Image (cartoon, rainbow, N blue to C red):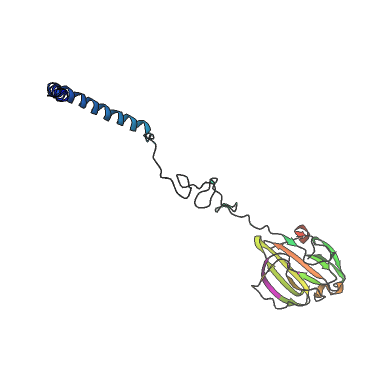
């Protein structure tokens, strides 16, 4: 028998006597390998722990941040965090109402003042009388609406001549007397401030000696007032 055969026979006998111990060693090595792999995997994985009050939000591919706000701090409706629209106006904000003003009804000068509590001499009537308006003259003879309103009366009589009355907001009424005519205006027509409504003339019977002029009166809630207290002096 050769030396190799003798050695293999002895090795085989050694394995038979120690096979139990070899199995134990293999089991221990297997367990150690599994533990090592588990530890390595845990240390290389990202921390996916979440607090109790934290909710994971999926990333929006459009770039919007969680909650619906866009990157610029604007909400999807186009409103900024302050609640204002891009135009700078709040939807519920009301614009202040237009202030009522009365412009001069002509580009001219004053000839006779308002005299409600005193008498002035009338060359036409040849007597002293109150003067419930103001008289105005101008080179172009044009007469304009002093403010926005609606025509409440159109007419003619010998004392007043041709005249137009306009109702305005807040209880004001303006009356334009001694017109050349009333044109195509009729009751109910709307007129805007500065609209040409006629020409001056001497049609007012009680002031015909004063020549072509405008006799202008103003009333507030049915009471006569001095037009000069309300008129804004400006040219048309």
Residue at the spot x=75%, y=62% of the render?
A: 103
Q: How many marks?
A: 0
Q: Position of residue 109 (x, y in %)?
A: 85, 65
- Asked if the magenta segment contains residue 153, the reply would be yes
Would you identify the image quadrant in which residue 183 lies? bottom right
> Is 171 displayed left or right of 32 in the figure?
right
Residue at the spot x=22%, y=25% of the render?
A: 28
Q: Position of residue 189 (x, y in %)?
A: 65, 73
Which residue is nearer to you in this view: 116 or 175? 175
Please determine whether, in this image, residue 18 is positioned above or below residue 57.
above
Q: Position of residue 226 (x, y in %)?
A: 77, 60
Would you identify the image quadrant in which residue 48 lies? top left
Give the magenta range: 144-154
Which residue is nearer to you in this view: 121 or 1? 1
Would you identify the image quadrant in which residue 15 lies? top left
Please determine whether, in this image, residue 18 is positioned above or below residue 58.
above
């Amino acid at each position: 028998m050769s030396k190799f055969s003798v050695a293999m026979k002895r090795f085989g006998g050694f394995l038979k006597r120690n096979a139990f111990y070899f199995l134990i060693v293999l089991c221990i090595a297997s367990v150690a390998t599994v533990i090592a792999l588990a530890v390595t995997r845990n240390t290389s994985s990202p921390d996916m722990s979440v607090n109790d009050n934290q909710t994971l939000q999926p990333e929006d591919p459009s770039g919007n941040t969680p909650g619906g706000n866009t990157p610029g701090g604007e909400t999807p409706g186009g409103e900024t965090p302050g609640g204002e629209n891009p135009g700078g106006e709040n939807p519920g904000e009301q614009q202040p109402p237009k202030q009522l003003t009365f412009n001069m009804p002509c580009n001219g000068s004053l000839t006779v003042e308002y005299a409600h509590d005193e008498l002035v001499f009338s060359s036409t009537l040849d007597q002293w009388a109150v003067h419930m308006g103001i008289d105005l003259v101008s080179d172009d003879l044009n007469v304009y609406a002093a403010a926005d309103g609606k025509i409440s009366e159109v007419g003619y009589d010998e004392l007043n001549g041709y005249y137009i009355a306009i109702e305005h907001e807040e209880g004001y009424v303006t009356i334009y007397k001694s017109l050349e005519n009333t044109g195509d205006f009729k009751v109910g027509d709307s007129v805007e401030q500065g609209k040409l409504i006629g020409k001056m003339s001497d049609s007012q019977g009680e002031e015909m000696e004063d020549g072509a002029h405008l006799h202008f009166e103003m009333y507030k809630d049915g009471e006569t007032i001095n037009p000069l207290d309300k008129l804004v002096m400006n040219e048309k």
